[in-house]
Amino acid sequence: MRSIERDGGPGRIPLSLRVSPETRDKLLAAARASGHSLTTEVEIRLGQSFERQALVSEIMGLLFGEGLAGLVMLIGRAMRQAGLSVMREKRQFRGWLADPDAYDAAATAALRVLDEFRPEGSVAANSQKTGEIFAYAHITEVVNEGAPYRFDERSWIDLTRTLLGRDLMAQSRWLKSAAAEDAAILAARTAAESSSPDDEDPR
């Protein structure tokens, strides 16, 4: 099989590239399966990555509609950069979602973006309450894996759980509260059982 350096042709430019042994093995296996040279396989996959980038706006538009899709993209980018900036200042390299300072910086960034596009006018007294109700309802649907939910809701819930990941799911205040409540109930039952008199007559 030709190497990247030797797979040339008219109008082609050599590109020096270093990858991990695992990535090279995967590329070699894919090239063999498709009948391509290693260079062609790499070029095809790079081209596909650019094509998929173009699908992002279409997918976001389908999911959220024009306007909200842009806000979601802007909020996500601002949150990520704010969180990473805090971690760089701390000279730490673990995930910023698990750091309270970085998370707070990201939350502030999100609120600032939302405030920038807030429409002018008076706000009804129950608006925030309505927002809290729907936020809590959807949070509960996603983090409470044991709860039943409508079949037509399954796809977005499963996708959201996958994207959140186990670590972030475990940070949910709802889950922590439920776990503490379950532990308290179990402790009360254990205490009641240990203090109950024996069924046998001691005489």
Image (cartoon, helix red, strand yellow):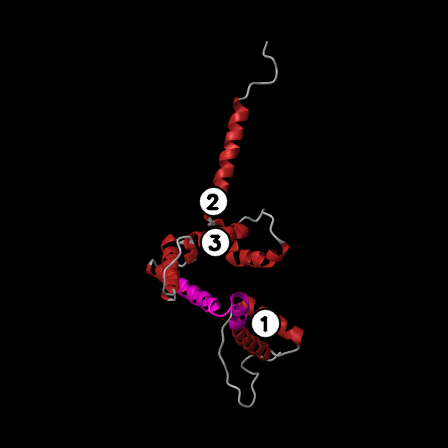
The foreground one among 181 and 30 is 181
Q: Please determine whether, in this image, residue 58 is positioned above or below residue 7.
A: above
The x, y position of residue 201, in whole percent, is: 60, 13
Q: Report which quarter residue 26 is drawn in.
A: bottom right
- Does residue 65 appear to the left or right of 34 in the view shown? left
Which segment is the magenta one?
56-80
N-terminal-most mark, 2 or 3: 3
Q: Main secondary structure of the magenta part?
A: helix
The foreground one among 142 and 4 is 142
The x, y position of residue 35, in whole percent, is: 66, 77
Which mark, by number, is residue 176? Answer: 2
Q: CA distance from mark 1 to mark 2?
A: 43 Å
Q: Are marks 1 and 3 in contact (CB under 8 Å)?
A: no
* Residue at the top extreme of this rendering: 203
N-terminal-most mark, 1 or 2: 1
Give the class, few, some or many, for how many residues have Cα within 10 Å of label 1's Cα (few <14, many ≥20): some
Residue that carries the numbered disc 1 in the rendered image: 27
The x, y position of residue 16, in whole percent, is: 48, 78
* Quadrant location of the N terminus in the rendered image: bottom right
N-terminal-most mark, 1 or 3: 1
In magenta segment, residue 23: no
* Amino acid marked by disc 1: Leu
- Depth check, mark 1 against mark 3: the one in front is 3
* Amino acid marked by disc 2: Lys
Which mark, by number, is residue 135? Answer: 3
Q: CA distance from mark 2 to mark 3?
A: 17 Å
